[in-house]
Image (cartoon, helix red, strand yellow):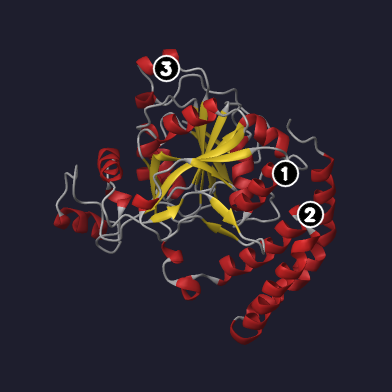
Amino acid sequence: MNIQDSAAQASPSPDKGGSGASQGSAAASVRATVSVHIVTYNSVDDIEGCLACVRAQSYPIQRIVVLDNASGDGTPELLGRIGEGLDVVLSSENTGFAGGQNRALARSDADYALVLNPDVRLHPDYVRRLVEELERRPEAGSAAGMLVRQPAAGLGGAGSTKTDEQNADAARRKGQEPGSGASEASPLEVRAWLDRLPAEALIDSTGLTMDAARQARDRGAGEPASAWLEAGETFGVSGAAAMYRRSMIRHASLGGEFFDETFFAYKEDVDVAWRARQLGWSALYAPDARALHARGWKEGGRSSVSAFVRRHSYQNRFYTLVKNERGWKRLPGIAAIEIVKLGYILLKERDLLGCWPEILRRLPEMRAKRRELRSLPVRE
């Protein structure tokens, strides 16, 4: 295990040894290299299961980078125990998803980089199927699979080796509510459940979509997974489990940043998707690549969303628009939506009014990034 503080400037050379179980006879026939990049923050309940599924991938992984953003829940200590073969970076401060991922991405030069949230459980063929799609489509800069909502009652069913009571006991030992989902599931159980794709399986994301008012959403969210079995293009991919082509990362970076670190967290994947499209890159959805995603705060509506999330999401919406919008004809529709939102904020969420001084302060910075984006060459 390679543990370093994120303040270190030197980057080690890529580890050509791969990731253990993901190596084997397939490695000889593989040409494109892949690295996996995970940013943790108080992720002690998720990271071990996430890494188990990464290590079980059928495609060889050149390097697994885990950057911890100054967690205080024991995540660094856990990584110290389970980090054999990992490139672990311990940050002395919380740099957010965007800053953490930028530092993690800089630690590899693999052809493809999988940006992964610790609350995601990958099917063992997730990486392989995305690489196959991207290799067939050189115009595509990114790809993602079918992200399915983690079932609240646990996986169970086909391939499960644990009884309901065993799952409940395991959850209690970790201080969780019984039936907390895939945290205790093995890669084999995750594979069996996703292969079976039971009728109750619901979509978390099949990529990003954007409406006429430039509001981005997770495509298919809450719909039956069985309705999303057709591959195709999408506006962009969710940063929860996104495969990015390294050449696109280099092309679309602004000021040396792929993810805009002003965003800190939330909507940074929308900004990247929009930017990449303007530069001539498409995004792919591959339903045969499947994963489970636990994103519980989405379930309860706005009442379950913290002020931190709502604040960054609101601010980043404006940053994304200033940087990327070029269609002046859309401005009346965008303005109408924002006026309605402002009315809601005045009635229900007055704490968000405090975002406006920061939004106005950042406007010159966002306009400068807009100019830089427009100066970049568009992919032919």
Q: Helix or strand or loop: what does disc 2 sit on?
A: loop
Q: Helix or strand or loop: what does disc 3 sit on?
A: helix
Q: Earlier in the sequence, mark 1 or mark 2?
A: 1
Quick check: 44 above or below 137?
below
- Residue visible at 48% across and 56% down in the picture: 72
- Residue visible at 66% across and 84% down in the picture: 346
Percent x, y for residue 134?
53, 30
Q: Which of marks 3 and 1 is nearer the N terminus?
A: 3
Name the residue nearer the viewer: 70 or 328. 328
Q: Helix or strand or loop: what does disc 1 sit on?
A: helix
Query: In this orientation, does residue 95 appear?
Result: no
Name the residue nearer the viewer: 9 or 256. 256
Q: For mark 1, what is the residue?
A: 278
Name the residue nearer the viewer: 258 or 141. 141
Image quarter for residue 121? top left
Q: How far apart are marks 3 and 1 (CA)?
A: 35 Å
Percent x, y for residue 71?
50, 53
Q: Earlier in the sequence, mark 2 or mark 3?
A: 3
Mark 3 or 1, closer to the camera: 1
Residues under numbered marks 1 and 2 in contact, where contact means CB atoms less than 8 Å apart? yes
Percent x, y for residue 27?
42, 17
Q: For mark 2, what is the residue?
A: 326
Horizontal arrangement in the rendering, residue 205 relative to residue 166 (left or right): right
